[in-house]
Every structure is written in C-alpha cells, then in structure tokens.
Image (spheres, rainbow, N blue to C red):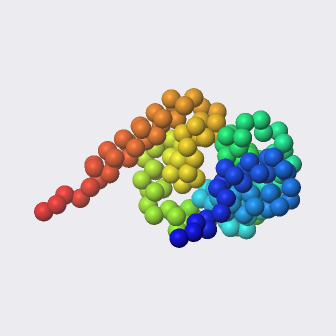
C-alpha cells in the first residue's frame, strides 16, 4: 500500500527556508495555520480573532523567516512569535478603551467549552500560571521539551522539573479527590 501522507513538517520548513517561494509558504501555512489558531483559541480568544492573529503570526514568519539560522529552532521560534503576538494584542487592548470594550463583549470565551479541553484545564487548575503554561505548550500545543525551553527562555532542567512537578501535583490532587469505592 502506498503512503500518501505527503511531506513532513520538517520537509515543509526546510523547503520554505531554502526556497522562500510562495508555494513553499502556502504549504507551510496549510500545516501551521490550524496549529496557531488552536494556540490562540485554547488561550480563550474567539475563533475570528484567533484566525486573524494566526495570520499575523504567519505573515511575520514569511517576512522574517530568512533570519532563522538553525532550522531545528523553527517551531519554537514560530510559537515565540505567537506568544509575542498574543502579549502585544493584550497590551494594546488594555491601553485602548475601544479595544477593551470589544474584548469585554466578544474577545474571550469560556475555555472549558472548547472540544479539545476534555477536562485538561480542570486538572491543571491546581498548578501555578507558569506551570499551566508549560503543560499547555507540552500537551495541547505538542511542543517538545527543547521547544518549550526555547519559547519560554527557560533552562531545559526547569522545563523538565515543571512538567514532572506538575504531573505529580495533578496526580496527588486527583488521588485526594477520588471518590471512595464501596
């Protein structure tokens, strides 16, 4: 049976960074756009704004992709651009009363209604904000430990500890709140 999966993420990244053609970017866009939309959606942005912000991220990738020296760092760089885009949007919305009122009525939705949540946010609610961020990057966004360390500018050991400690705390919390069997 033939394999029809197509090129891997690595191949698409390599092609884009090598050729910088519109077709290479279009192929890259098709793979990463849904991931970046999910990144914003899972952090509470409504779909339309998540899509707009994902487009902004990928336009930045198109413009600044030539600055990537180490191709293995592309994914962490991409998520760092997404993180910076989100921070910039939140900073602008805090300072602009027109954006603030829009945010109050339409920007944020209840994250626990998202289909990919499946109770994950309830489980990580016992963690600190920075621990939750590491867990979301790992288990929702699918980043490797190396990629998380790069996105958050943390040492690898800190990322490993936060994930290990987070899992331990979640496990202890779940055991503590487990109903007793009769």
Tell me the quadrant of the picture where the C terminus can be found: bottom left
Determine if residue 107 is in view: no
Residue at position x 68%, y 39% from top? 73
Determine if residue 75 is in view: yes
Expressed as whole percent of the image width and height from the top left, the position of residue 4 reads: 61, 68
- Is residue 43 shown above or below 75? below
Residue at position x 52%, y 31% from top? 158
Expressed as whole percent of the image width and height from the top left, the position of residue 121 reads: 48, 56
Of residue 11 and residue 163, the one placed in the foreground of this image is 11
Residue at position x 81%, y 46% from top? 18
Expressed as whole percent of the image width and height from the top left, the position of residue 165 reads: 41, 37
Of residue 163 and residue 172, the one placed in the foreground of this image is 163
Relative to 94, 153 lies left or right: left
Relative to 63, 111 lies left or right: left
- Is residue 171 shown above or below 119? above
Q: Quadrant of residue 84?
A: top right
């Amino acid at each position: 049976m033939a394999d029809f999966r197509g090129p891997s993420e690595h191949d698409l990244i390599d092609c884009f960074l090598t050729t910088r053609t519109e077709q290479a970017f279009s192929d890259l866009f098709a793979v990463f756009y849904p991931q970046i939309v999910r990144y914003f959606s899972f952090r509470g942005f409504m779909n339309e704004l998540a899509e707009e912000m994902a487009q902004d991220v990928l336009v930045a990738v198109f413009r600044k992709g030539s600055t990537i020296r180490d191709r293995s760092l592309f994914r962490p760089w991409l998520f760092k651009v997404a993180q910076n885009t989100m921070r910039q949007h939140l900073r602008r919305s805090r300072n602009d009363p027109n954006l603030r009122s829009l945010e109050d009525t339409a920007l944020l939705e209840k994250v626990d209604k998202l289909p990919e949540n499946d109770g994950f946010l309830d489980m990580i609610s016992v963690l600190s904000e920075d621990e939750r961020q590491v867990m979301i990057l790992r288990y929702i966004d699918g980043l490797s430990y190396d990629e998380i360390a790069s996105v958050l500018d943390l040492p690898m050991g800190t990322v490993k500890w936060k994930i290990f400690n987070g899992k331990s705390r979640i496990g202890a919390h779940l055991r503590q709140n487990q109903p007793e069997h009769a």
